[in-house]
Amino acid sequence: MKIKNLILLPALSMILASCASVSSADSSFYRIDDPISSSHKGEHSSDDYSSEYEPISSELPISAFQFSVDGVNTLRNPSELTHSISYEDYSSESFLNFRNKMKAFSSKLSDIFVKKYFANDDNFVMSPLSIEMCLGLAMRSAGGETRNEILAALDMDYETFNANYKLYYDYLYHSYKNNMGFTTSQLLLTNSIWIDDDITLKDSGLDALRDDYYCYSYDVDFDDNNANANQAIKEFINYHTRGLINPDIKLSPFTFFVLMNILYVKDIWNELGSDLLYAPATYKFTNSDDSKSEKRLLSGYSVEGKPIVTEDYSCFYTSTLNGYRLYFVKPNEGKNLKDVFSKDTMNYVLDNKNIITKDDEKMEIYETNCYFPEFNVAGDFELSEVFHDDLSIDSMFNPATCNMSGLTDREVYCSEIKHLTKLEVNKKGIEGAAVTYMAYAGAAGPGPYTLIQDTFVVDKEFGFILTYGDGVVFSGIVNNIDK
């Protein structure tokens, strides 16, 4: 009897763009139909939940999720569509607690990555949100000690996580258009499970993933047509990340199934999609090895607040048109970025109360313009050690202890966890995607205040955090601006 592998592929963002047919000597994989982009009914920032809005996928045709291998449609079971989110949902104590827990876990993950993967001359980016979304699929599919270990890492109980995961998905997922009909901002998520066609999984588990975790089901033949199965997953990821991630998928013929989350983000700086202007001067950017690079820095739009300044670092942010915040953390002279860009720093920076917008005693309000460089970063990580050593998720790596009883009672174990990311920040805006997979064998105040204007210049090595609402979408390090 052959032993099959269970594969959890938490991937990044699903993007809905047109994609050409792909064919090779070994396989013929193609998208059946182009998805149709739809706009929200009205424009909302991530902090505006005073009324309901319609999410994009409520108008998305099912053909957007239909993929074919050698002419056979792989879609087994479509998920339901995302829902609107009301102010009552958004402001509930349970959901607020969930978001705070996820934010704390994002800081913990980022801290782990900095400690493990920091190199003085290298840049990297990771997506806490992608990993979190995938862990949710794994948690719901697991049982016993495996589920308990995942929940302990997240610092949550099962009832809280299960009740709020879907709401969190709705809270973050969006696609906005401007008055001219052009898409200006997206945070697109896709959950899916890819099942070997010889394997029977529990209907109750698949139904729970579909109903509570927005998870689509697909059939492929990992055993007898392994090349086609791998090609299908590769092209699915490439398609839903708008070509940002084109992974080399080599899942074995013994694969049982793959759990996947895909995340894609994009936004522009202004309503017209115009380029940001450059700062008036050229700056000497100081890399982590103390080398200098002459750089023109982009001049972000002024936003409320003044920079956070501590004895170890300074920090401020720039904002996109639709509410993404890109924070920059600069180490002070004589301080090391690896030590400064820590869990405690992230928790402090992401607490909006620590950005001072006015001083009532001095009758001053504050506004800061951030000068920052364009940059393009990517990451490719194997995370088994992170899960085992840093998150204490151990049982899934041992066939004797791994419990995925939400989907199957057969013996499975995790043999590989990969995390792939890409993020670009330029004069047009931001765009990024991430993939994670786990193989088993992310107005000024009133009154007569004086406006105090400042400029925060990112002219040396920095850590960065990209957020949307309370979701930490990406975080990373830029040690060398020329890489």
Image (cartoon, helix red, strand yellow):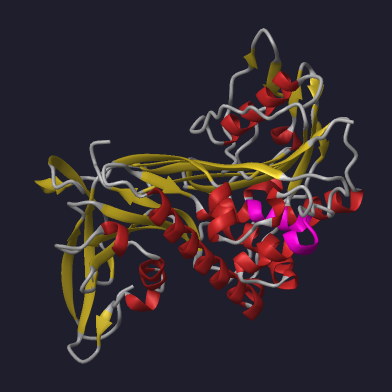
Q: Quadrant of the C terminus?
A: top left
Q: Give x and y (percent) for residue 236.
A: 64, 31
Q: Is 7 displayed left or right of 481 in the figure?
A: right
Residue 116 vs residue 241: left or right?
left
Q: Is residue 272 above or below residue 254?
A: below
Tally of numbered tags: 0
**Among all residues in the image, which is located at the extreme top?**
25
The spot of residue 453 in percent (x, y) is: 17, 69
- Please identify the dominant SS of the magenta region: helix
Q: Residue furthest left?
A: 281
Displayed quadrant of residue 6: top right
Magenta region, residue range: 134-146
- What residue is rendered at 65% in x and 55% in y? 135
Work out whether residue 97 can be spotted: yes
Q: Picture quarter containing residue 196?
A: top right
Q: Nearer the viewer, residue 118 or 75?
A: 118
User: In the figure, is residue 356 to the left or right of 175?
Assistant: left
Camera-side residue: 272 or 316?
A: 316
The residue located at (69%, 67%) in the rendering is 161
x, y percent for residue 198: 88, 30
Q: Position of residue 305 (x, y in %)?
A: 27, 72
- Quadrant placement of the N terminus: top right
**Residue at x-position 48% and y-position 64%:** 108
In magenta stretch: residue 457: no
Does residue 314 lie above or below 246 as drawn? below
Q: Residue at x 56, y 66 (%)?
A: 102
Is any part of residue 174 visible from this angle?
A: no
